[in-house]
Every structure is written in structure tokens, then in C-alpha cells.
Image: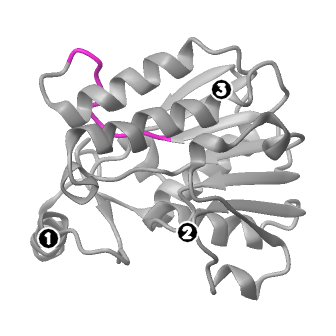
Amino acid sequence: MTRSIENAVVIGATGLVGRELVKQLNLNLACKAITVIVRREDQEFKKHSKIKQFILDDFLLLNDEDVNGFSHAFSCLGTTIKKAGSKERFYNIDYEINAHFADLFEMTETHYLLVSAMGADASSRIFYSKVKGELEHYIQGLDLKYISIIRPSLLLGDRQEKRTLESATQKLYQKFSHLVPDTFKYKPVSAEQVAQTMVEAAQTQTNPFVIYDNLQIQNFK
């Protein structure tokens, strides 16, 4: 069964996965309108008539009217503790804003899709994984018609912001990628593969709740 992505709303649209997702949605003929929620106007998005920019400095100020009537809601918002500056700020972005965004779609027909992370576990001793797991647990408890959770491993791609450790890991992986079997569940995936997974889930998922793990993401080439 295929369900059209008639009109989509995206947060985290200026990030690595977000930009790729918006690109793919823009090329999707069935998708008639895309709203990206951004803190400042993005020049790349201005080039496309199908993309509308909703500019808001504080995403926690989003309300029901702002996101009413969308067939699909995509959350690609995420950061690192280093970039955020503190664990508290990281929690505010990765948990509180994403949780608030999901809240807005309770008891609607909107399909909610979230980019989480491999290893997400509310009981983890690793703060990053713990927060991701707590967010997943919270979202599962909401009254949402459809939920898709995407759990990628290390993301490959060119980020606008610098992430030193990720850049070094990418270079190392690219050097030895030919030695990594396709069945290796921790194999890094590209932003394009993650975005493809989200689009596929948005169009074909029939179960109310599905987690897409890294091996499933790898299926997209």
C-alpha cells in the first residue's frame, strides 16, 4: 500500500539528514507542499517554490495551528553535547523540542517520523543514547496514528558545521570500507539512505509503530 506524502512539515531541515530529506521530498511528484521550520531564512530553500519557510527562533513556541493539516511530520532535529555546549542544552534540543513537536500531532491523521540513533536506550549509561531512548519511549506513549523511528549508525555526508570526531571517523571508514560486509549492523550509512528510508516509511508503512534499524537503512543504495 502506498500513501502519498501530500504535504510535509520538517524540523531539523538544515541539518545533514534534513537537507537530503527536503531534497527528496521536493523531487517527489506526489508531495505538493513542504514547510520547513527554521530559525533563520535559508537561501537554498528559497530557490524552490514548493518549499515554504516558517521562521521561528524558539521551536518550543510552535502551536497546534502552526502545524495543522499536514499528512506527514518529519523530525530530523539533533545535535551533539559538544556543539550544544552542555548536557542541559543537548537535552533541550534533542528531547524537549522533539517531544514538543510530536505532541502537536496527537489525535490527528499525521504520520510522525523521527530520526533517532542506533543504540537508543532509556537505561543506557551513555547520556546521548539515554536521551534518545527516553525520547523514543515518550513518543511511543503519545496518541499518534503512525510513528516511524529511524535508527542510523554513524552518518556519512558533508555537514555545514564541523564535527571533528565524525569527520575523522568518516575518513577512516572510507579508507577501509571495502573490508566492511553489508551485513555488519554497525556499518555507517549516508544521509541519503536515511532520507530514503524516511520517505519509504512515509509512503508504505501500515503498522501504527515501526522502528527501522541500521540494517534496513543499508538496503537503500
What secondary structure is found at the residue carrying circle 1? helix
Residues drawn in magenta: 115-123
Q: Which mark is residue 20?
A: 2
Q: Which mark is residue 164?
A: 1
Q: Earlier in the sequence, mark 2 or mark 1?
A: 2
For the point 37% across and 78% down, the residue is: 160
Instruction: Reply above or below: 39 against 92.
Output: below
Residue wearing tag 3: 103
Query: Identity of the amino acid at label 1?
Result: Thr
Task: Answer with left or right where residue 192 lies relative to residue 26.
Answer: left
Q: Main secondary structure of the magenta part?
A: loop
Query: Identity of the amino acid at label 2?
Result: Glu
Task: Answer with left or right where residue 67 lies relative to residue 14.
Answer: right
For the point 73% across and 52% down, the residue is: 9
For the point 68% across and 79% down, the residue is: 45
**Residue 25: quarter of image:** bottom right
Q: CA distance from mark 2 to mark 1?
A: 21 Å
Q: Decide: marks 2, 1 in contact (CB < 8 A)?
A: no
Q: CA distance from mark 3 to mark 1?
A: 34 Å
Instruction: Reply above or below: 127 against 7.
Output: above
Q: Is residue 71 visible?
A: no
Image spot of residue 90 (x, y percent) = 30, 44
What secondary structure is found at the residue carrying circle 2? helix
Q: Earlier in the sequence, mark 2 or mark 3?
A: 2
Instruction: Reply above or below: 33 against 127.
Output: below
Q: Is residue 144 visible?
A: yes
Query: Identity of the amino acid at label 3?
Result: Asp
Task: Answer with left or right where residue 196 lies relative to residue 115.
Answer: right
- Mark 1 is surrounded, within 10 Å at the Cα level, by few (under 14), some (14 to 19) or many (20 or more) other residues, namely few
